[in-house]
Structure formats: C-alpha cells, structure tokens
Image: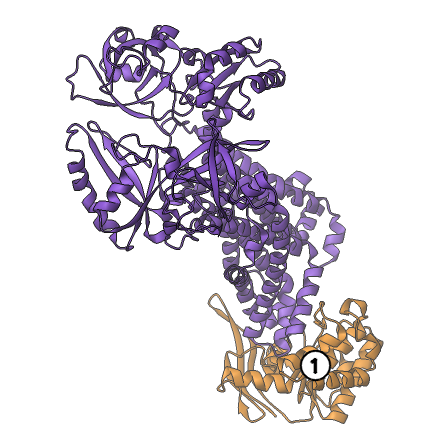
Chain colours: A purple, B orange
Amino acid sequence: MIRNYFKTAFRSFQKNRFFTAINLVGLTIGFTCCILMGLYIQNELSYDRFQQKGTRIARVVMAYSFGEKVNKGNYTSTKVAPVFKRNFPEVETAIRMYQATRIVKHEDKVFNEKKFMYADSTFFDMFSFRLLQGNKAIVLEGPNKVLLTETAARKYFGNTNPVGKTLYIAASQTPYLITGILQDCPENSQIKFDFLASFSSMGNIQEKTYWNANYTTYLLLKNEQSFASLQSKIPGFMKKEMADQPNTYVSFELEPFNRVHLYSPYPGFEPNNSITYIYIICAVALLILFIACFTYINLGTASSIERAKEVGVRKVLGADKSQIFWQHIGESLLLCFLSIIISLLLVLLALPWFNGLADKNIQLTAIFTPLNLAFLGSIWLLISFAGGSYPALVLSGFQPIKVLKGLFRNSSSGLLVRKSLIVFQFMISVFLIVATVVIQQQMQYIRNKNLGYQREHVLLFPLDQKMLENYPTIKTELKKNAGILSVARAVSDPTHIEGGYNMRSDEMPPNGQLSVTATPIDDGYVNTNGLQLVAGTNITEQDLLNADELKHPEDLVMQFILNEAAAKELGWTAKTAIGKKMFLGDDRPGYVKGVVKDFHFQSLHNTIQPLVLFPSSWSSQMMVKLDGNHLSQTIAAIGEQWKKMVPHRPFEYRFMDDAFNQLYESENRLAKVLSVFAGIAIVLACLGLFGLSSFSAQQRIKEIGIRKVLGASLVQIVTILSKEFILLSLIAFILAFPIGWWAVNLWLQDFSYRITIHWSLFALTGIATILLALVTVAFRAAKAALANPVKSLRTE
Amino acid sequence: MIQLEKIYKWHNNGNNRVFILKDINLTIEEGAFISVMGPSGSGKSTLLNIIGMLDEPSEGSYRFLEQDVYTIKEKQRSELYKQNIGFVFQAYHLIDELTVYENIETPLLYQNIKTAERQAMVADILDRFNIVGKKDLFPVQLSGGQQQLVGIARALIAKPKLLLADEPTGNLNSKQGEEIMELFKKINEEDGVTIIQVTHSEKNAAYGKQIINLLDGRIEK
C-alpha cells in the first residue's frame, strides 16, 4: 500500500514537473531560511549556558547621580567586590575583571593583544572555563601571573609547553609568569579572552572610593533566590557608605548574568544582542515558512482538479476517505522530506556566507544534535500536515461519480481560501519590504547625517604611556609627512565619548551640581576632528601646560571648551559663555574658552547631551587626519616612521569611519539580514503567484481559445487573466500598509534622530509590489494568450 | 441478489422537482446479464450508480445480498461494496500514474490482501486476459481497447459477484466492442458473475440475457 502511494507520488511529481518544482523550490528556500535562522537563534539563546553557576551570578551595575538625573553603567570601582563580600552573607564570592589591550612579547614575537583580561584569583570558583594545566586555586594568586588559552599558547610558543615560562606584557615589558593553559573560550560566551592575568597585576586594587568605575564586578550568590533580598539591602547600605558625600547618590543594581547578552542595555566585554532582534528574526523565519507553506497549500488545492480523476477512480476501486487523505499526506511528507534534505545541503553551502552576515561561527554539526533533529522532524511533520491536510481534505471529500462524470468544479470556498492565502503572502512581502526600506533609509540617514565632526580619513592609534612620553617628537615627525593635515591625542574620538562628571558655573551654589559628559583633549583635537567653534577660541599648547594637574594642584586654572548644550545648561548662550568661570567637578576650576557647535558624540539613539572638553595630558589614543589623497602611500609612509619612533608596538590603526560604523553594528546587521530575507520572501510570494496564475491559465485554456476565435487581442486576454491577481496584490498592499507603518515607527522610536516616513515610500512600495505581481502574472498569461486556439479547443 | 423498491431520484430546480428516476422496482437474480437501454437523460447511469452504491436515491429501498443497503453502517456498506462490486467505465478511468500491473493491483490494496496472494491474483488475471506482456506499460501507451481490457481486469480482480459497466464500448470501434462483449458473455457464463451494463447499442444489448428499457426515469414494460 505504502509502496503504491510512493510510486503514485513520485510519478505524479514527474508528471507535474512544473508545479512540483515550484513547490520544491519554495519549500526548500523556506526550510533553508528557517534552519539558518534557527541555528542563529539557538546560538544566541545558548549564550553563557555552559556556565554551571550562571543562574547564581550577578553583574553589578552602578547607578549614580549628582542631582535629578540618575546615570547607570555596568562599570564599578574596585571597592565593590571586597566590600559586598564582607558585608552581605548572600554573597558567596565576588570578583573584579578588567579587559585591556596589551602588547605581549615573547622573544621576537610581539603582538597587540585585544583580549587581555584581568581577573581576581577566585575566578574559577565562579566561572566554568576549563583549565587544562595548572591548579585552579593558585594560578591567579599574586601579581604578574598569566594564563593563556590554547590558541594564544600556540601563537607564541608553537608546540612547546609554555607553563613556567615568562611573557613580557605592555609597553613597560613587565615579566608575567605563565601559570596555566585554558581551553579556548566558547564562541557563545559574553566573556572571551586570549590571556587571563591576575587582577593584582594591575597594582591598584584600592578600596578607597566607589568612584573610578572602570571595572566589571560579578557576584556569586549562595542561592538563586536571594537576588531580590540582596538588591533590597543595597540602597540603604550605600547611603551609609556615601554619608560623607551628601550631594551624591550612588547605588548598585544586580543583573542576572544569563540575561546580560540578550536583555541588558549595558554591553558586556563585547556588544550585546537584543532579544527584540531575536524576536524579529524569529518572526521573519516564521513568515518565510508561512509564505512557502501557503504556496504549497495553494498549488495543492488548485491542482486538486488534476488529481480529482485519480481520486474518483480510487474511490470506485474501494478506497475510503481516510485512505485518500493519508495518501496525499504521504505525498506531502515525501515532498517536504526531499525539501529538507536539499535544504540541509544548501545550509551547508550557505553557512560560511551566513556566518559572515550574522557575524557568527556556526558549524553544520550544530544541527545534528538529538534535540535539533527532533525539532527538524517536528517541523517536517508540521509543514507536511499544515501544507498537505487542506488539499488532502478537499480531495478526499470528492464524490467519485461527479468527478468521473466531469461535473466537478472547484468549490468557491476553496477559491476564497486560495485568494486569502495569496493576499496574506503579499502582505508579508510588502511588510518586509517596507521594513527593509525604512531600516536602510535610516541607516543611510545615519551615514550621511552631518554629525558635526568629520570622520573621513582619520586614523586612530592606541596611545600607551611610552608613546605619550615621546608624543611631542612623534607629533612633529608625523607632521613632516605632506599627506597628514593634523595630529591630536585624547581619551575618546568624537564617535563615542563617555565619562560622567558634574559641573557648575561660578554663579551657582557649590552644591548645585549638573551632570555632564566630559573628556580630556589636546590643542589639536578641535581641528583634527573638524569641530566647529561658534564662539571663543581653541585651547593652546600653553593651556595644556597650565592644566597639568600634577604640576599645578593648588593654583590650577583650566580653559574649557563646551558644546552649545552645555553652555545652555549652565544658563548661557555660546557668546555669553566665553570667559565665564566654571568648575568641572570640584577640583577643576577654570574658564570657558570656546564653544563648539553641538556634535553627535554618541549614537543617534541619544539626543545631544551637554559636553565639556578639557585640556589634559591624559590620553589613550592618537588621531591622525589625512588629506585623503594617495591614502595608501601616506599610510605606508606612517608605517615606516612608526618603526623608528614606536619600535615596541606593532603598526596597528583603524579608521574613525569603522569606529563609527561599530556604533550601529546590530542595526546594520539587522538591515543586512532583513534585506536578504525580505528579498527571499518576495521571490517566494512571486513564485506562488506564478504557480497559481499558470494554473489558472491552464484551467481557462478553453475560454481563452474561444475568446481568441471570437477576436480578442493579446492585451485583452492578458488583462482578463491578470486582473484578479493584481487586485489581490492591491488588497494585500492596503492591508499591509498600516501594520508596516506601525511597526517601522516603533523601531524608529529608538532613535532620537530619525527619518520621517514619507507617504511616497508606501506608494512606491505599493507600485513596486503590484508591478512585480503584474510581471509575474502577465508573463504566464501572455504565454497562454499566444497559444494556438485550435489546439486548446481540440483538447476538449 | 438485488431488490430495488420504489426508487425515486430527483433534483430540486427552483420550485420544480426534476425527476431522474421514478418508481423503479427491480429484482435481479445472481448470474443475470442485463442490458439497460434508453435515450440520453433517461436515468440509465443514475440507476447503475445507485446499484453500485456510488449514488443514493431520494427515496426507496435497496437490498443487496439480503442486506438493506441504506440501514447498515457506512463501514459495512463499504465492505459489501469492495468485496462484491466491480465497475467498468466508458472512459476506462485508469490511473495514469500507475502501470497496467499496478492499476489492476490497486483494488486488492484497498482490501488489505497480502503481497504474495496479490501477486498471484494479478498474474492470474493478466494471463487470462492475455496482457502479460503489457503489464509494465502505462495507460497512455495502450490503445483504447487494451485500456478497457485492463479496466475490466481491474474490475474483476477482487472476484466481485456483480460487474457494473457504464457504456463500456462507447469509446471503442466495433471490432474492439465485439471483443469486449464476448468477454462479458464468457465471464457471465463461466464465472457466474452478474453483469449489468448500460448501452446505447442494440447489438451490444443483445449480448445480455435480459434488456431493461428506461424512458424518462421509468422502466418501460
């Protein structure tokens, strides 16, 4: 019996090659997208799940305020971990971590390592990273101890065992003893490092202050349930701790470690993903599967007329309803199975590309876990039944004599189902297209928006202590290069400035502090980054010397540059601000020397906040503005100079443009992923429409023949055949319009600076969709209309 | 074997009731060979379909092999039908996707007969009908006469007691038609299969032992 079904199924696939191909292509694309997105989602959801104590770990978020506005960030000072461990019985252990970029040297091998992590010695009591060599209890005990991952060990030591050997770290070339080897960090870990050094190596494990929040603190609670009780104790405890600073508020919040990657607004050691994007991707995967499934259902019911005779005969031969039903479900199972097999091959081929798109490193083997195979199996059954049961029901309900007598007509209810499915498919497509276009437009808006600074042709170099000592020489030497316009140093480049301070004008009472972002700069900063002074003048070299906090602790007077927002916040205009006395914090008195036009020093998600730029020798990066001509020669020339001036560092730089793009990494990725899948969705919808219109043309071949004999022109016939489908896509568009508008506006709300959606966008999308539908349908209609009517009429 | 009593069949066309069959009373004994004749629209095929349980009358009762067809359960009726009735059509109605062998085998599949037994039965009938050489061909590769031969073989494979044929020679030339009629006669006489055929042709009707004439839904006496 089963064999008979399979044979019939295979032969009917062969006979209806065209429609089978459409179904197969549609389902295969659908499954492929789904498997890829499923792998992605699974990878994201599996983040940090390998941490055995993950549910008991809390990341500490600092909340602080000098007035009304409370700032929050995921960095704390070094004081939090020891104090909390001592004072709260709920805390089993606490550790501090710090991620740095360090130059690592072994013999002739020198690299700038970006994933150099410092952690307290109890690291392994909390985290489940695997130590391959060394004793967990003591490897990070005491200063200047370092662990290497297997990869890092191979990089520096090849196949020899590095344990017990020495690495020279940072510009100071401090010797670190290698005490062990770690397994490489899992891909799906929010904490990733190549080197793990003891926290005490940094020398500054003070317990003086809750300020200087530069470190990440994790607490391991004794019990999962004590998050809330511990959280409730913290504000009161902190109030006592901060009693000596009555005008400030400092408290801490606990964030479950496992929620950081997808739910936290604060990044970890790497950028987070957002659960919203996971939902969006999940939804897109489902929508694509729906579209593929609908095409399948549609073609299945439409072609049921073709299968009707067979069903009639089988019924006469003694088949009952359920046997017919199962036969067609069987076919569906077979077709879906074939699609899944082909999909798996496609996934294999597409994975490298997809990994690039999604910035992942997913292996095909990830599919072949029992759970995933079970899931794939259920998807197979689900789609086979969802796609196959409606046609199977329609078919098994046929009355044999009517079918065999040719009295059979497709029921109008079946027609309604088919039309609704087409409308739904096009709705999904229109929706995805609108979303994609809006996201692309917003991203383009971001790229092209005048941000108030110039980020083209600016190279960024890390600046360490040794370079800083030598900085005047480096600057002079670089400026000799004709391709270099200017050089500056600072802590932050203008794409992203952080740093919470408080400020007040001389006119305000000493306790009337205002929150402000501030960052140290030098005299070249304004020019190099193309900031626009609207009043006053730039700071000078002399101002820099005067601002040296170590040399002039008593009579320090600084010259500040404000942005317009800061001037306004202090109650001045750009003009009136110049020369006014103000304080940055309590220990930096000074005068306003210049006001720059507001520029976007944070991502466009945020509005422009008050900003103070103050002269300082404190720097961590160097900015070099090039003139943009002969870029590669200029960079090569800098490389030559670098070897002489900075022999202790490899020549590594990045463009400010790239730094800027990093701010919008998740949006850019969403835009890329969405545009690919929206494209696939519209192809699938058109495929379905093409199949159905082909079918309708085939059905109406006699009508077309008669009309042609009666003198209808090509255009008239194409119009007759296309009209209905065009109408359907129009309805789909009208229905998708408000949903799309609502959804994209929701997404845009996240940006303080955003495009306004013009009605023409919708009009254009609508016209494009309908044109696409028209081309799809008209192609098939024209073919039918061009057929020789004599032939089509004779077949009756 | 068959007792039809007061069989009426009508359609409602607006307020009018259009009768297809009117007051049909008919008793058919086992081993009969009946030709049903009558002009187009006289209700021949409807009568055949009612006897074949593919259609139901609007009114009346039908006993088949001592069982009341309309009071027994759906499942029993299906069994009664599968085991006792074979159908032959004017347009052959072979399944295009299946070979000759598979077409003939299909009714046995629906009766859950074991593979070995099935193979023996199909081989036997292929042999009897002289179509062994064609068993792997598809219907489109056969002539009309050969297709109808397969159709009959398929109808007889499950050894039914009753063979119903709706203009079995309608699409065939006269020589092919004669051969089919000779076959019917042989089946009726040698195997004792009861045959009811609908036909337009006087000549074919004459193969039957009894002729029933239908006119406007009534049996003409």
Q: Which residue is mark 1?
A: B155
Q: In the drawing, does residue A632 fall left or right of residue A226?
A: right
Find residue B109 and report its horizontal and vertical position in percent.
65, 79
Circle 1 SS class: helix
Relative height, residue A256 to residue B150 (above, below): above
The quarter of the displayed image where residue A499 is located: top left
Q: How many marks?
A: 1
In the image, what residue occupies the spot 26% across and 6% down?
A579
The quarter of the displayed image where residue A140 is located: top left
A583 or B184: which is nearer to us?
Answer: A583
A418 or A660: which is nearer to us?
Answer: A660
Amino acid on which the number 1 mark rests in the picture: Ala
Considering the image in quadrants, where does the N terminus of chain A appear?
bottom right
Considering the image in quadrants, where does the C terminus of chain A appear?
bottom right
Relative height, residue B183 to residue B16 (above, below): below
A439 or A713: which is nearer to us?
Answer: A439
Residue B144 makes an appearance in the image: yes
Q: Residues within 10 Å of mark 1 (few under 14, many from 20)?
A: many
In the image, what residue occupies the spot 36% across and 42% down?
A120
The quarter of the displayed image where residue A241 is located: top left
Relative height, residue A357 to residue A304 (above, below): above
Q: In the drawing, does residue A55 fall left or right of residue A293?
A: left
Find residue A342 and report its horizontal and vertical position in percent.
64, 55
Label 1 marks a residue whose chain is: B
